[in-house]
Amino acid sequence: MRPALLDPLFSPITTLAGVGAKMAALIERVLPLDLGGRETRVGDLLFVLPNSVIDRRSRPGIANAIDGQIVTLDLTIDRHQPPPRGNRSVPYRVYAHDDTDDIALTFFHAHAAYLEKQLPEGEQVVVSGRMERFNGRPSMVHPDHIALASEAESLPLVEPVYPLTAGLSAKVLRRAIGQAVERVPTLPEWLDAAFMRKHSFASFDAALARLHNPENPLDASPENPAWRRLAYDEFLAGQVSLALVRAKVRRLSGRPLAGDGRIVEKLRAALPYSLTGSQEAALAEILADLAEPDRMLRLLQGDVGSGKTVVALMAMARAVEAGGQAALMAPTEILARQHLATIAPLAARAGLRTAILTGREKGRERGETLSRLADGSIDIVVGTHALFQEAVTFRNLVFAVVDEQHRFGVHQRLAITAKGDAPDMLVMTATPIPRTLVLTAFGDMDTSKLTEKPAGRQPIRTVTLPMERLSELVGRIRDAVAEGQKIYWICPLVEESEEVKLMSAEERFAALQPVFGDQLGIVHGRMKGAEKDEAMRAFKDGETRVLIATTVIEVGVDVPDATIMVIEHAERFGLAQLHQLRGRVGRGSKPSSCVLLYKDPLGETAKRRLSVMRETEDGFVIAEEDLKLRGEGELLGTRQSGTPGFQVARIEFHSDLLEAARDDARLILSRDPELQSERGEAIRLLLYLFGRDEAVRLLRAG
């Protein structure tokens, strides 16, 4: 049960004054996390942090105020000048003065009675807002704050600025957040006292109060100790919950998978090339893990084309030698079929029986695959998440490989676990993940890296080209097609949208058709599976030579003789995505090139991205740069894909705290695995605060 102490933070936000259902829906849009369909709670508002502040401490007097500056003025009200009757287009003016000059306070569509009460003639008042001059005369249009001099204490002199959305006013949001902060109960401290002193951390509630009621602009900076305290709390909650998942997974103790090496050796003999040094090293680490009685949970990172699939196949062969079955799960059907195309011929030579299972296999064919999985006559199955539906049973699943892990969350990892008797798990990703992010997303995993390209791979020449030179590019592509080359042409959208004026795949297809005719193909995410496969087959077999595509081809599509990659509106893509797309060419023996088409004017970030792409092909360098340019939230593809998007922590400012949080989490759980000590109980509260309830449930599930 959730401790009653936290109840005030778990009530719906509609229990706050001034927040009805309509307002709650607007507030939900500015929350830094995806609620996953549950209703918004009071506690969710605590972590809507200011992105800047308005500093109203400047009180220069009317004469010395600079045009456009936000100032606070101490005024005496002289007179009101309402607009002429029936003419609403003329503003209502209130004239006032201080020791230095006169000023007109200007209001459009004003209510006279309200203004007479707020600004009584002859009274001393304090107003704050943006200073302007009309025809050289000082003016302030719609001051942000007005108060009688006797009540001036109520004016916020340093005002937090929160993210907003259409229809949600800053005032309403500020009031709602203020109420949420007031509801925070006095909580026991879950951080170590010496650690807090070292980092100048205040208590949890004091840190929250400081961020939401800043006394100077530095208070609302991510580098301020108050923000760092909350970032550390979030990291600690994440690391403790990852460690609990790992402990649960480990407790389902594995079994040693030791083989006699005969199938692995047959596979080696079947390979048309020898493994690279880093492939050999990764394979050795995986096989050593499999031989241990503990369950394996390992992340295999390697750039596009570094040969992860072959390493996974060798490891799966070891599992089969040990008398079990292996499964390889991919996030999309295209990718699953491609893995099968890589694996099946090699597996057949080594006497391994393979099959595929995706949402498309139906009827008799599906029934047959299911019964062969159940009776053990399939050794290796490749598929999408369809592999882990209820109807699928394995005779003895001992090893699971998950490709592109960031598309699958911890939940899917537990679902896979349920399918076998705690199968060993290898997770592969072609998104090079910086060390800091490996810790946040996969803190619970050992890591192997593939750092070399397979032999014979060609470097890719990358150039940037402005859209104005498009016709020149089309001419060069026509020559390349005449020489028998294959070209990918990536567009950011499927069809043109009203809001974003970008070239869509369908428009580009229509524009290039007169030039390339039947040699032009198209593939995008809205096409049916069979249509996509047909488009890919035609391109692979050379019936089409230019393939217009959206980013569906980003992950894993393999056409070794494609040599040119054109990315249109390259400035709209993140670095990781540009790198993934570029990796689709240069997979054969011919030199390849990548053309980044961009539209001027370019912002600073876009400029930096394109130059990084020109300078390096090293995925890990690119990932670190991407982290600096974008922060973690976007790094693993999209915000929604179950990535560790943080509410408070900003990797670019707080990564130094991450290692400390991991070590702290390990220490806490080694001393108190069930979180039953005084500090353990406090940590349970922390897990609830940051929405890690499932980790607390794991404690109970044992």
Image: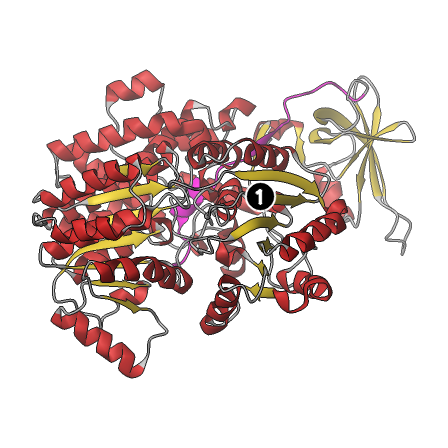
Q: Which residue corresponds to the image point at 19% horizontal and 56% vertical from the top-left?
A: 417
Task: Please state which amino acid type lies under the numbered disc 1.
Answer: Ser
Depth check, front residue: 634 or 70? 634
532 to the left or right of 2? right
User: What residue is disc 1 on?
Assistant: 593
Q: Is 55 part of what is drawn in magenta?
A: yes
Does 697 sit above or below residue 531?
above
Quadrant of the image occupied by residue 187: top left
Q: Is 61 part of what is drawn in magenta?
A: yes
Does 576 sit above or below residue 220?
below
Position in image of residue 327 (x %, y %):
23, 59
Q: Residues within 10 Å of mark 1 (few under 14, many from 20)?
A: many
Position in image of residue 423 (x %, y %):
16, 54
Q: Main secondary structure of the magenta part?
A: loop
Depth check, front residue: 319 or 168? 319
Mark 1: secondary structure: strand
Q: Which residues are magenta?
A: 38-62
Residue 186 visible in rendering:
no
Task: State the colouring used for the structure image.
Answer: secondary structure
Residue 520 visible in rendering:
yes
269 to the left or right of 586? left
Does 243 sit above or below residue 339?
above
107 to the left or right of 308? right
